[in-house]
Image: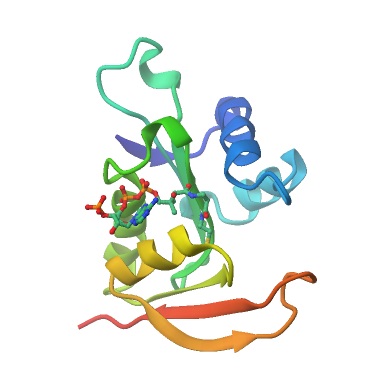
Amino acid sequence: MIRKFRYSDLKDILEIEKRAFPKSPYSKFTFLYYASAYPDNFLVYIPENNEEGLNKIVGYIIFYPGGHIISIAVHPAYRRRGIGTELVGEVLKRTEGNASVEVRESNEVAKGFYKHLGFSLQTIIPGYYGDEDALVMIRKGT
Ligand SMILES: CC(C)(COP(=O)(O)OP(=O)(O)OC[C@H]1O[C@@H](n2cnc3c(N)ncnc32)[C@H](O)[C@@H]1OP(=O)(O)O)[C@@H](O)C(=O)NCCC(=O)NCCS
C-alpha cells in the first residue's frame, strides 16, 4: 500500500535512509521540511501481510510537483520486488509519464533502475555532489 507520509513514519524512514545512503543520509529536519513543503508528494510504501501492520514502512519517495524526483529509497531487505517501480509509478501517474532525477555517477543500481523505467541520460553536472558528478536522467511521457 502506498500512502502519504505521516510524522509517525519518521523513525522507519531514517532507518531506511541510513542504509540506502550511508555517505550522505538526509537528516530528520530535511524530511520534516519536505513533509511540510510538499505533503502530497512525500509517499511511503507499506507491505501487505506484515506483522507490524500499518506502521511498517519499507520505502519512500519524495518529488516535486512537476515530476522531479528528490529522493527514493527501499529497505535493502525489500528490494527487487517492484516496490521502487510502484513508487516511481505514483509520480508518473501525476505527470503523464514525465519525470527527471539526478543520479550519482557511481550508482550503477539506480542508473539501471531508471533505465528500466524508461529514463535516459540528458546531461552530466560536474561536481554536483562535491565528490562526484551527477547524471541527469529524464523520462518523457507518451
Ligand atoms: C534504486 C532502488 C530504489 C530500487 O528499488 P527496488 O524496489 O529494488 O526496485 P524494483 O524492484 O522496482 O526494480 C525494478 C528494476 O530495476 C532494475 N534494478 C533494480 N535493482 C537492481 C540491481 N540491484 N541490479 C540490477 N538491476 C536492478 C531491474 O531492472 C529491476 O527489474 P527486475 O527486478 O525485474 O530485474 C533501491 O535499489 C534503493 O533504495 N537503492 C538505494 C537508494 C538509491 O540509490 N536511490 C536512488 C537515488 S537517485
**Residue appearing at x 27%, y 46% in the figure:** 82
Q: Is residue 24 above or below residue 15?
A: below
Q: Position of residue 108 (x, y in %)?
A: 48, 63
Would residue 112 appear left or right of 107 to someone viewing this image?
A: left
Q: Is residue 12 above or below residue 33?
A: above
Considering depth in this image, is 44 or 39 the residue closer to the camera? 44
Would residue 125 appear left or right of 94 to someone viewing this image?
A: right
Q: Position of residue 12 (x, y in %)?
A: 56, 27
Q: Residue furthest left?
A: 142
Q: Position of residue 105 (x, y in %)?
A: 58, 72
Q: Is residue 34 above or below residue 13?
A: below
Q: Residue furthest right?
A: 130
Location of the C terminus by quadrant is bottom left
Q: Residue furthest top?
A: 51
Q: Position of residue 30 (x, y in %)?
A: 72, 49
Considering depth in this image, is 97 or 26 the residue closer to the camera? 26
Quadrant in the picture for residue 81: top left
**Residue appearing at x 57%, y 44% in the figure:** 20
**Residue appearing at x 64%, y 34% in the figure:** 14
Location of the N terminus by quadrant is top left
Q: Is residue 90 above or below residue 51?
A: below
**Residue appearing at x 62%, y 76% in the figure:** 134
